[in-house]
Amino acid sequence: MPYQTKGKRDYKKELNWEKKKKPGRVKDRASRNAARKKAGLKKGDPRQVDHKDNNPRNNTKKNLRKVAAKTNLKKESKRKKRG
């Protein structure tokens, strides 16, 4: 359950928790955000960036592609089975 402050989600507390418990997650998320920028996706764009090799820190142009959210979610189930 996400951290709540006055009935609203507290992202700062969540980020602090992630930094302490899972430092790799913070770097992965930052890298995914950088990939969106590199691929040219703007805020509100329904498409997502897919990392072809499943490594969120590999943001080379040849490893990124723009896909529909549905396509990316299908790939996610395969990643979880393997990992």
Image (spheres, rainbow, N blue to C red):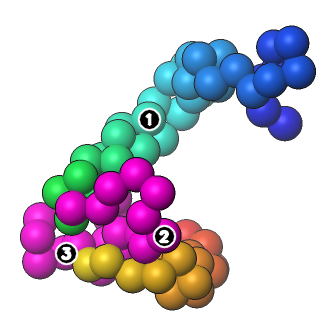
Furthest-top residue in this view: 6
* Image quarter in which the C terminus is found: bottom right
Q: How many marks?
A: 3
Is the residue 78 above or below the residue 39 in the image?
below
Dot 2 or dot 3, earlier in sequence:
2
Residue type highlighted by circle 1 = Val
Magenta-colored span: 40-64
Q: Observer-nearest residue: 16 or 81?
A: 16
Residue type highlighted by circle 2 = Pro
Q: Residue at x 84, y 36 (%)?
A: 1
Tag 1 and tag 2, C-beta contact below 8 Å = no
Q: Which residue is mark 3?
A: 63
Percent position (x, y) of residue 44? 46, 57
Q: Is residue 65 left or right of residue 82?
A: left
Spatial separation of the CA atoms under disc 1 and disc 2: 23 Å
Q: Residue at x 30, y 61 (%)?
A: 41
Percent position (x, y) of residue 34? 26, 48
The magenta stretch spans residue 55: yes
- Occupied quadrant, residue 45: bottom left
Q: Observer-nearest residue: 32 or 19?
A: 32
Residue type highlighted by circle 3 = Asn
For residue 26, say whether it is visible. yes
Q: Which residue is mark 1?
A: 26
Q: Is residue 7 left or right of residue 77?
A: right
Dot 1 or dot 2, earlier in sequence:
1
Q: Secondary structure at mark 1?
A: helix
Spatial separation of the CA atoms under disc 3 and disc 1: 21 Å
